[in-house]
Image (cartoon, grey):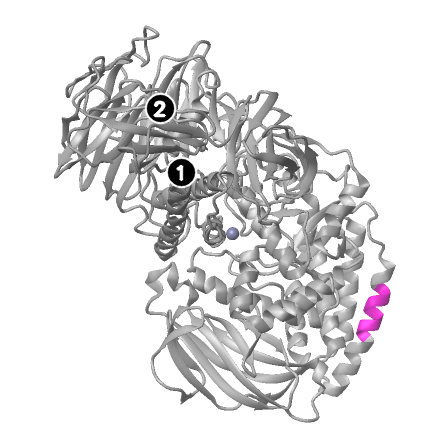
């Protein structure tokens, strides 16, 4: 039979399956602007409206009516049918959120009750948020009716349609022919011209025959299986603001509750505790229902992180917090736990993730995104993923036609199995289905397909469903011999997200560091028997976690998302700042008899001699005196009305502790001398030459007697590239950017800003069209770092700015810091896999070393890098135009530093230097105390402290350390007053007690291992 006839017949049959009972009565409406959850600016009062009703783009519209339900209605089969165009919304029944209504969800089960107060809340033209060109468009409400569905009739429609579609994907010719015959004979058996009553009887008869004949076509026993799970991906902030995502949660989750009531086969899996928290706050009636479905085992709280977080930029500690707070929420609210990390849509997965997940009790990892590779096909769909430290977890990356927003139709099910790579090892692939990205979830049609496909269907893989965890548990039980992928899951696309929306990256880094300092200082106070409340930090952490969502932190959301996120980060930093101030006061020594001095705090776990800027209460200070009576020079930056801004250097501050220094008016005799001009800088460490652009043409290491730069090539070479036009330009950097380098067009000025015994500053100001880049090149007498403190007024569009450092180093491998460790990547493009890594992620540093010498490039908030041959580059700014036309326009501030060193990056302790750039000493001045120093915790051995925080249960201090170099060895922790130590996992569950004597304990650590301990004083 001609497929066009079958298609028409199926459409006609479907229309006959519903018997219309009544059209809903007159509607009143009211429009508004949605301001925030539950808050609206209404345009006027309720008024009667005619249907169809057109609504301006971007407005929220409420419709209301009262429905008196006809008494004789068969309630189980009765539905509300809506008709609309470009509206997305929520149906409230008797003031409670009942179901989402949108283009994919137009049919809602009729609620119980004789008289129903119906209110619809719609957003008109939802895409307006990201497409301002739609402003003149309108959404349209075309009304609603009540109808009764003949279930057998509808089931035949579903089954016949499914069989019809299966014909085109069935690879076996005999089954295909049998299916064709079956579809044709069933279509012919139904006479569409019959009156309805007779038609219904005929359809029921046809269905019995259809099913009987279908059962005679045997499915292929080797066709494999898919495990279908209901799902709906909701981007927490993306092409709409977070406040819209909150409404999406209400719509999607209330729909899911209706689907669970209607279909026993429906299992729904939903990640992101943040979304549950929103639902609890704004849709409490839906939340209560969710709780019931979770209890019934039909709704899975799967997915460990607070939100589905970015894994390139988010720090290691933040990833731990994502899971710590995520799992804590599920446990508290639902009494559930999960072993699944659900990150379908994240733009690359760092090499530390297996260890982080395993350390949090997560054994299973699911993603999809690796199938977006631009060039190289990822070879596995089910495998063991081995991380930096050797930890392994079970990972599943099934390929799908429609990513994680599948429809269980024959085409998608068949492809899903075809693309499964481990067919021989384990013949099943996970298939998430349901409308998503902007939420929605499955509808009745999808469940019709699922029911037809369940068990087996000729020509298709078998299908089963159930709770998500069952899929992974069954793989574990079967223990198949799976391949191993060792190291990062680099995503060959979306490389631009390492740099887009630079202010967001800076805000996130700053908040991460401020929260760390607040926790470390509060813990120092606790170790000094002083209590500082860290309660406000939990909300601050949750906010930080929220904005690490995989479109927010990567920079791929609309502008309004960033306005809100940056404001939220300011609040986070203010909260952390208040705890820091309180903790400093609690820890700081005081001695009223002493003369004024200053106190320097070190939150890092090694002693430091860093340069620090302080404000002193006098104009006569010429040196500072440490606890050993030694004088250290100061450099006066500025003097004003009885005060001065000073730079000081050289005084040691102990690990996780502080030094009190006294002010002295006596100058140090042996202060170093530096020469600083606009073309030449000479320090005790370097001889540097600058060209007229302020770039470095010569950098000579006086200690090691070598020229660091490649001859003839300037360093800190600021490079402009045309960056676009590109599809999804906020996400993507095109491989050919290198060929589109264009020169600076404006003037450059170079001036000496500061010179003295401790540091010298040359300011380079460059103009390019309307953009101004101001860089302070800072050199130090003792610190081997060369800082580039940068402020930019960025006005370029579709332009990328990089800083390049061509160095005299030969190596085929470069090293990049990742969360809790470092990875090596090639500096060449030998293979297609190497070539695709033309822009890669690093946390705080990258390094290129040869035997005996190397150069590290540190940063305080940048992530995009590339090291090709002997050139290190850091991506400073982009100017993408979609989805935020003004992305990165305006003011930016950031610092990167060149750190040349003898030995390789481990011998040079690049890790520590990068930590120091990011977590500077905190100076408090003036303090009334005599010179003094104290360490509250010290570490001996190859580990450094990532985190010291009050334990979640309020009992003791959590200490998290990691091995940053890929080395192993014994570690001793000294913390006076500590008498009990328990090793815990990353989320603070106890593992084993350790012996602590005289405030010290020992353990051994392995390459890149993370260890967590709970410390208690007796
Ligand atoms: Zn997403």
At horizontal 76% and vertical 43% (from top left) the residue drawn is 475
At horizontal 43% and vertical 57% (from top left) the residue drawn is 239
- Label of residue 536 in the image: none
The percent position of residue 309, horizontal first and vertical second, equals 52, 47
Magenta stretch bounds: 206-213
Instruction: Look at the numbered disc 2 and say if its residue's Cβ is closer than 8 Å to ligand 1.
Output: no
Q: 946 or 875: nearer the eye? A: 946
Using the numbered discs, state the Cα–Cα distance from disc 2 to disc 1 in whole angstroms.
53 Å
Residue 108 falls left or right of residue 243 = right
Which quadrant does the N terminus fall into?
A: bottom right
Prevalent SS, magenta region: helix
Q: Is residue 343 visible?
A: no
The percent position of residue 140, horizontal first and vertical second, equals 44, 76
Which quadrant does the C terminus fall into?
A: top right
The percent position of residue 944, horizontal first and vertical second, equals 51, 28
Q: 887 or 175: nearer the eye? A: 887
Q: Secondary structure at mark 2?
A: loop
Rendered position, 422 above or below 533: above
Camera-side mark, 2 or 1: 2
Q: 320 or 734: nearer the eye? A: 320
Q: Residue furthest front?
A: 593
Rendered position, 303 above or below 668: below
- Label of residue 733 in the image: 1
Mark 2 is surrounded, within 10 Å at the Cα level, by few (under 14), some (14 to 19) or many (20 or more) other residues, namely: some
> Can residue 852 be found in the magenta stretch?
no
The residue at which mark 2 appears reads as 627
Mark 1 is surrounded, within 10 Å at the Cα level, by few (under 14), some (14 to 19) or many (20 or more) other residues, namely: many
Q: Residue furthest top?
A: 705
Image quarter of residue 702: top left
Instruction: Looking at the image, tell me whether mark 2 or mark 1 is earlier in sequence order.
Output: 2
The percent position of residue 692, horizontal first and vertical second, equals 16, 22
């Amino acid at each position: 039979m001609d497929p066009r006839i079958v298609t028409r017949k199926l459409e006609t049959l479907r229309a006959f399956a519903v018997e219309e009972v009544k059209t809903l009565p007159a509607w009143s409406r009211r429009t508004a602007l949605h301001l925030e959850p539950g808050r609206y600016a209404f345009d006027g009062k309720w008024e009667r409206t005619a249907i169809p009703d057109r609504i301006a783009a971007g407005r929220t519209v409420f419709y209301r009516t009262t429905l008196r339900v006809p008494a004789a209605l068969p309630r189980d089969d009765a539905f509300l049918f809506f008709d609309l165009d470009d509206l997305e919304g929520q149906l409230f029944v008797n003031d409670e959120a009942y179901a989402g209504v949108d283009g994919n969800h137009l049919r809602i089960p009729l609620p119980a009750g004789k008289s129903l107060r119906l209110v619809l809340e719609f957003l008109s033209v939802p895409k307006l948020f990201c497409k301002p060109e739609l402003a003149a468009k309108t959404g349209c409400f075309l009304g609603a009716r009540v109808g009764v569905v003949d279930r057998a009739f509808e089931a035949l429609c579903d089954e016949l349609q499914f069989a019809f579609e299966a014909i085109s994907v069935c690879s076996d010719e005999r089954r295909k022919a049998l299916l064709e015959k079956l579809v044709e004979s069933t279509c012919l058996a139904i006479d569409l011209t019959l009156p309805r009553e007779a038609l219904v009887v005929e359809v029921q008869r046809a269905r019995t025959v259809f099913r009987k004949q279908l059962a005679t076509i045997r499915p292929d026993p080797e066709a494999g299986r898919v495990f279908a799970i209901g799902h709906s991906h909701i981007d927490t902030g993306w092409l709409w603001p977070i406040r819209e995502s909150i409404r999406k949660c209400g719509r999607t989750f209330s729909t899911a509750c209706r689907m669970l009531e209607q279909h026993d086969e429906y299992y729904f899996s939903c990640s992101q505790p943040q979304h549950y928290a929103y639902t609890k706050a704004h849709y409490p009636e839906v939340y209560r229902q969710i709780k019931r479905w979770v209890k019934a085992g039909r709704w899975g709280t799967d997915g460990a992180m607070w939100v589905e977080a970015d894994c390139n930029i988010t720090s290691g500690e933040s990833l731990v917090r994502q899971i710590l707070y995520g799992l804590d929420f599920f446990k508290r609210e639902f009494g559930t736990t999960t072993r699944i990390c659900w990150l379908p849509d994240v733009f690359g997965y760092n090499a530390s993730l297996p260890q982080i997940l395993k350390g949090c009790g997560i054994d299973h990892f699911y993603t999809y995104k690796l199938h977006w590779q631009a060039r190289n096909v990822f070879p596995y769909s089910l495998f063991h993923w081995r991380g930096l430290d050797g930890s392994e977890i079970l990972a599943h990356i099934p390929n799908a036609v429609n990513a994680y927003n599948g429809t269980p139709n024959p085409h998608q099910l068949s492809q899903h199995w075809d693309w499964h790579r481990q067919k021989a090892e384990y013949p099943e692939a996970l298939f998430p289905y349901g409308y998503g990205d902007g939420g929605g979830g499955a509808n009745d049609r999808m469940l019709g397909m699922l029911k037809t496909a369940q068990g087996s269907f000729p020509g298709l893989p078998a299908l089963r469903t159930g709770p998500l965890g069952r899929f992974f548990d069954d793989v574990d039980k079967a223990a198949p011999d799976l391949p191993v992928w060792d190291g990062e899951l680099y995503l060959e696309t979306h490389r631009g997200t390492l740099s887009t929306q630079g202010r967001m990256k800076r805000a996130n880094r700053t908040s991460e560091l401020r929260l760390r300092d607040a926790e470390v200082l509060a813990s120092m106070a606790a170790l000094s028997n002083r209590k500082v409340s860290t309660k406000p930090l939990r909300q601050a952490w949750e906010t930080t976690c929220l904005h690490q969502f995989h479109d927010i932190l990567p920079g791929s959301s609309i502008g309004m998302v960033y306005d809100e996120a940056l404001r939220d980060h300011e609040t986070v930093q203010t909260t952390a700042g208040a705890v820091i101030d309180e903790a400093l006061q609690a820890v700081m020594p005081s001695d009223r008899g002493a003369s004024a001095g200053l106190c320097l705090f070190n939150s890092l776990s090694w002693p430091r001699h860093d340069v620090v800027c302080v404000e002193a209460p006098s104009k006569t200070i010429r040196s500072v005196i440490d606890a050993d009576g030694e004088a250290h020079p100061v450099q006066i930056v500025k003097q004003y009305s009885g005060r001065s801004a000073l730079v000081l250097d050289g005084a040691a501050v102990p690990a996780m502790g502080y030094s009190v220094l006294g002010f002295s008016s006596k100058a140090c005799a042996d202060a170093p001398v530096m020469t600083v001009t606009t073309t030449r800088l000479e320090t005790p460490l370097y001889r540097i030459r600058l060209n007229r652009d302020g770039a470095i043409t010569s950098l000579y290491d006086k200690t090691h007697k070598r020229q660091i730069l490649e001859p003839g090539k300037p360093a800190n070479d600021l490079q402009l590239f045309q960056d676009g036009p590109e599809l999804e330009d906020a996400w993507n950097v095109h491989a050919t950017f290198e060929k589109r380098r264009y020169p600076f067009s404006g003037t450059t000025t170079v001036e000496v800003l500061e010179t003295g015994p401790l540091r010298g500053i040359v300011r380079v100001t460059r103009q390019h069209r309307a953009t101004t880049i101001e860089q302070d090149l800072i050199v130090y007498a003792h610190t081997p770092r060369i800082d580039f403190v940068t402020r930019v007024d960025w006005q370029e569009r579709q332009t990328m700015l990089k800083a390049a450092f061509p160095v005299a180093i030969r190596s085929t491998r470069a090293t990049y810091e990742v969360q809790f460790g470092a990875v090596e990547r090639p500096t060449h493009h030998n293979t297609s896999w190497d070539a695709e890594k033309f822009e890669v992620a690093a946390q705080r540093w990258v390094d290129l070393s040869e035997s005996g010498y190397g150069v590290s490039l540190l940063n305080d908030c940048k992530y995009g890098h590339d090291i090709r041959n002997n050139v290190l580059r850091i991506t400073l700014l982009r100017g993408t135009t979609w989805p935020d036309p003004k992305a990165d326009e305006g003011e930016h501030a950031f610092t990167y530093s060149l750190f040349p060193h003898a030995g390789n990056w481990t011998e040079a302790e690049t890790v520590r230097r990068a930590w120091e750039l990011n977590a500077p000493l905190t100076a408090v001045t003036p303090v009334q105390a005599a010179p003094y120093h104290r360490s509250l915790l010290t570490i001996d051995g190859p580990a450094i402290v990532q985190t010291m925080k009050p334990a979640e249960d309020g009992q003791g201090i959590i200490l998290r350390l990691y091995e940053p170099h890929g080395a192993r060895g014994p570690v001793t922790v000294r913390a006076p007053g500590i008498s009990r130590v328990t090793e815990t996992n990353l989320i603070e569950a106890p593992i084993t007690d350790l012996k602590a004597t005289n405030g010290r304990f020992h353990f051994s650590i392995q390459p890149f291992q993370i260890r967590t301990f709970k410390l208690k004083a007796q």
